Structures are given as C-alpha cells and as structure tokens.
Image: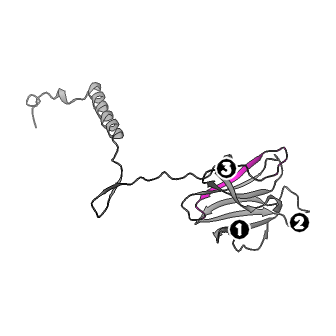
Amino acid sequence: MQNSAAVPDLAHTHARPVHWLATAAAMAAVVAGAGLTQPETATASQPGGGRETTTVAAPVPAPDPAAVRLPLECGGLGSVVVKKATGDLDGDGTPETVVAARCDAGSGTPPSGVYVLANGRDSGPRVVATLVEPGEKQSVGALAVRDAAVTATLFGYSSAAVPGCCPDERRQVKWQWQGGKFVRGAQPEARSM
C-alpha cells in the first residue's frame, strides 16, 4: 500500500466542463473539414497513357404520376392514383412508373385503369401503355414491379347482379415487356371470394 503523502496531487487529471467544450469544438472542426473536402473527379487511364475524365450521369427519376393526364373519363370528378410501383420494365436502364388510378367517386368501388408511364425524351412523362381499361370493371388490390414484370391482383364481378361495392372475383395477373409491347402472362382461373 502506498501512503497518500507519497502520491502526487493529480488534480490536473480531473476534466472540467471547459476541457469537454474544447474537445467538442476540436471534433466539430475535424468533422466539418472532412465534410468540405471532396474527392477528385473520377478518371480513367487509357493504355496509351492519356488521362480521360469520366462523368457519371445522375440517374433519371421514375415518372411522376402527378405530371401526367391519365386517360380516365370521370365527368366532373377528379381522378386519384390508388397504387403506384416503379422499376425498369423494358431494360433500357431508366425506370417506368405503373399506376392504378380511378375516378374519385367518394363511395362504392369505381373501376380502375392500370397505366405504364415513361419519361419522354423531350416531352416529360407520358402514358405509354394501358394494361387494364376502366371499362373492364376491375379494381386493383396489389400492384408491384419485380424482375422487370408488373404483377397485380385484380378484383371483379362474376355477373351484373353482384353489388358494385363487393367484387366477388380475384385474379393474379402479370405483364412482361416482350417484342416491343406488354404481354399479359398466363393467369390462374378466376376464383370466387
């Protein structure tokens, strides 16, 4: 055991608030300096010894449904997008947007249309395909884009006697881009709910 008289006074080892404040200020300066420092532009060297600058273009955003007039006939009512999914459907490296939209009727189950939107080269977003016409009297439960395919759950009616509020048929459908158009894949037989 050591005698307390033999131990030197270590009062300078006790941190005071001013020490913590100085440390925090120094750390903030280091972090701010790191945030302001940017790496050089990416370059690629050619075997010939020349130096070439490569610029990577920003990814093109998926089309915004709010910027497109959908082909719905709603009379005086507006339309509403009820489902949306995005992904590259045609393999060109730019995403498309798939929307399920219907008239904003306020009650009942108004039929939906399913549309594919793409960015035009100079014209902005536009409708490039209609996958489900509102005249088919279907509503959309689920909508997704996976593996360059559109999948949806469609609800419909087995007869005109079924109330409009309560669709009694359900179908799983899939569309794939083939030969310059969307092809509806084999679908299971309609099932009653």
Residue 150 place in picture, x, y as percent: 65, 64
Quarter of the rendering occupied by the N terminus: top left
- Name the foreground residue: 183 vs 85: 183
Dot 1: element = strand
Residue 96: image location, x then y, percent? 61, 57
How dense is the environment of label 3, judged by Cα within 10 Å: few (below 14), some, or many (20 and up)?
Answer: many
The vertical placement of 9 against 88, above or below, is: above
Residue labelled with disc 3: 65
Residue 159 is marked as 2
Q: Which is more toward the observer, 162 or 111?
A: 111
Mark 2 or mark 3: which comes first in sequence?
A: 3
Tag 2's secondary structure? loop
Q: Residue at x 70, y 74 (%)?
A: 186
Locate the C terminus and report the quarter of the image it occupies: bottom right
Amino acid residing under circle 2:
Ser
Residue 89: % across, % down: 60, 63
Left or right: 51 as drawn, with respect to 79? left
Q: Which x, y percent locates residue 115?
A: 71, 58
Magenta extent: 72-90
What residue does disc 1 label?
173
The image quarter containing residue 192 is bottom right
Answer with left or right where residue 155 lies relative to residue 31. Answer: right
Q: Which mark is residue 5?
A: none
